[in-house]
Image (spheres, coloured by chain):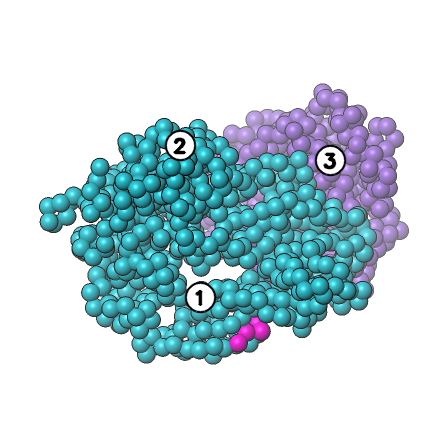
Chain colours: A cyan, B purple
Amino acid sequence: MTDTRLIRNFSIIAHVDHGKSTLADRLVELTGTLQKRQMKEQLLDDMELERERGITIKARAVAMNYLAKDGITYQLNLIDTPGHVDFNYEVLKSLQACEGALLLVDASQGVEAQTVVNAHLAEQAKLTVLPVLNKMDLPHARPEQVAQEIEDAICIPAEDAIPVSAKTGLNVDLVLEAIVAKIPAPTGDPQANLQAMIFDAVYNDYRGVVLFCRVFQGTVKKTEMIRMMGTMTHYEVMEVGKLKPDMQPVDLLHAGEVGYIVANIKKLQDVVIGDTVTHEDEKRRNVALPGFRQPKPMVFCGFYPTVPSEFENLRKSLEKMRLNDSSFTFEPETSDALGFGFRCGFLGLLHMEVIQQRLEREEDMDLVQTAPTVRYRVKQTNGEIKEIRSPSELPDGSVIEEYQEPITHVNVVVPAIYIGAVMKICTDRRGQYVKTDYYGKERVMIGLRIPFAEIIFDFHDHLKSATRGYGTMDYEVEGFEASNLVKVRILIAGDEVDALSFLCHKDQSESRGRKILKQLRKEIPRHQFEVALQAAIGGKIVARESIAPMRKDVTAKCYGGDISRKRKLLEKQKEGKKRMRQVGSVEIPQKAFLSVLRTGDED
Amino acid sequence: MNPSSAVKSVGSGTSLYVHVPFCVVKCGYCDFNSYVVEDRSVHDRFLDALDAELRATWRGREVVSVFLGGGTPSLLDPDRLRRLLEIVGRHVPLRECAEVSMEANPESITLEKAIIARELGVSRMSMGVQSFHAHHLKFLDRAHSAERAEQAFAQLREAGFANLSIDLMFGIPHETCEEWRSDLERALALGPDHLSCYNLTFEPGTRLYRDLQRDVVSPNEQEEDRTMFLHTRERLAQAGFTAYEVSNFAGRGGPCHHNDHYWLQGDYVGVGPGASSHRAGVRCTNLKPVEAWANAALAGLPCAGSAETLRPLQRAAEAVWLGIRRTSGVDLVAIEQRLGMPLLGLFEPILASQLEAGWVAFDGRTLRLTPDGLLMADRVGGDFLAVGVAR
């Protein structure tokens, strides 16, 4: 059994692109956990999508043995955290499995919005935070100023910040020494009853669900019966082990350690991330760990299979997604236009995009996705509050006393010269200015209150373009406020298309309705007849467009050299047509269902 | 020799296409493989390579028709034009061939070149005029005036060509129906023996396509294109022309057999950079850059840059798609026999829906587009192609 005093559990927290995965790789390499040739670049980002987008979405862990300068070998458990704005809950889970965190900041970019938020999360989890300045190999690294920014923004002393280059390996050994010297060893009694937290899980076709756990109290070993307290299910342990980073079985996991448990768990819904694992035997049970909030999805959209017969397969795939992503929710819904599908909840827009792409890539699903909406609320005349995740859930107008919409607190970090540009975006989106904090002379953090519905409409893209890429943001939903909302219905050739209808603020309803119709006009191909597009609020038509009928569809030229190319083009068009949805007599391309998304304010 | 008897049966004989990839300017609408090359030594290298490719590919086949296209074949100077025709003539007996067409442009054709072409066996000239309106010619990047086009036409006649065709274009952005009507009249006044009238399309890779993407130009209203298209058919019928394909009209000179051969899915050999060939369901296209193609040809290597082999059903579907654009329609029974596979059953559902839409007429053997269907030829043809790609 490893002496608990020789264990260090830590995370790395950073803004996206500040080099977290690269540093993790160097630590793994330097401790000899893996030989260099065994390492794929950026080891911890093991989902294809993560690598491609350069963001870490799923938490993963790796155990390293480190022979420190004091001659003692320590067990270092690195728990990787996701680095994007939508994944704060997952970051928190991972942090709570640790005693310390490396706060990694790019020495040329400086403190960014997520740096601040992640650092606050680490404080909330009562972790020891060690500042590390990365990318010192870059010519414009400015370690002194960035250290000052850390002190200003996060209020932790930064004179000891370790300047490193994860890329070249500079000073990475000092980081290892600091982990040993400054991060406290875990406490916990191996003799106590088992108390472990599930911070991640993956599904393996042969072994079922593999749990990744931090053991806080007691021990767990093969053949013991364990109980998951949240889901109230029990299983027999088949194997326990450590992640090095591939799974290596050990005899037992004890208090303070991080590892995996295989228990032949086939039912995906039995595993909830953040749940507490204890022994099934009542005499050996411990209590559930406090402090876990179930993540509440804030953005919703519908996923529909392209082919109706794929509905059950889609359900299976969604279950798989949910397994290692507890913040993702789904339940069946039906749409007149799209048939049977699922209403899915996400933490944010990126989260939605990631899930959608994972479904398409890893699960090979062909999906129609409807435009996202936030979680609204309706206060009914009987005092009851009803949550609205889809415009179709709205109760009858006569029982609605008040509409409420979620409001976010948004932190934007930008060079000071862009304050004006940020203010303009804020005003355009029904936002309110809250405060400005200066970090050093040139950078500011602007606090804003903006309705969440405004954030999900490409706010991030607009911020990036208005600040030439310098602006970074983070947001948190603060609560709900009364708002003057209306439901805008979209009618195509006289038929209401429920999948396109949406809720929005009354002041914006007409212009947004108009923009959607314009977008639809571009996306829906001509038919043999004129197709009327209308936006309506209640019974009143507030905008209309029409798609002129197809009057001529004949290629002028087709000669010897054109035959292959033109034939392939037509064959491809025909393939595309198969993927259209029929609403009444109108064929609507799948892309059109996302048009509500692309109506920010580009024109 | 009677030209129509020489090209009657499909499947027998091969047509030859010769691609001359040079132009004075690259027109904004043109997506053909052509280059503006100042250096005349490239023309010589082209001719050398052409000789080599013909030697390797033609191999004394039975010739149906020859078409010298481009690019602009008339751009070659008189000596090189002579050499081009001598080279082709070495492999294919041009004078005995029922139809030898050549493309010419007003800015480069001369009486001298026309006489050379006539002497060496070219029997039919097709001249790209496109428009008689200066502002449209400019918009299209054409390198000639309306007057020069008329003069060039007269020179071709003077050289003794009895079969002259004119290419015109309608649906040019901002073109009015009135302008198009007057273009047609001015073309008819010249007394051509064949007319091709093309609705402008925005082809990927062209300057116009890029302009369209950047919203610098916008296409005409479909309704106007339709009006011009229908007017063309009406007016040319009145003038005694037979519309034998979507964009082609036969006068005294009859149809262009070479193009008909393409549409009847006949075999053809294409030589020159980027030229396409077809033989029994295998379609291939030569390397496009002049140098790459010439290097291959001169080294005695195959010049093809890409190739595809059609599956039998795909080939049948293609036959319908190509053939249905012809006014005389497609003989489904003949295709069944030629390809040795039953088709009517496979096409039945698609046929039924198109009959119901009123786009096609079918007499149990021949499938034809109705006047409504003609305007939807891509839709109709596309439906058949879809049957070909389905497993």
Asked if badges 1 and 2 are on one and the same chain, I answer: yes
Q: Residue at point 59% right, 36% down?
A: A313
| Above or below: residue A505 compared with residue A501 | below
**Residue labelled with disc 2:** A225
Q: Amino acid at mark 3?
A: Phe
Q: Are marks 3 and 2 on the same chain?
A: no
Q: Say which amino acid is labelled 1.
A: Met
Element at label 2? strand
Under circle 1, the secondary element is: strand
The residue range painted magenta reads: A428-432
Crowding at mark 1 (Cα within 10 Å: few <14, some 14-19, many 20+): many
Q: Residue at x 83, y 50 (%)?
A: B233
Q: Quadrant of the C terminus of chain A?
A: bottom right
Q: Which residue is mark 3?
A: B384
Mark 1 vs 2: CB contact within 8 A = no
Please identify the quarter of the rendering in which residue B3 is found: top right
**Percent coordinates x, y for residue B283 in the rendering:** 60, 33
x%, y% of residue A203? 45, 36
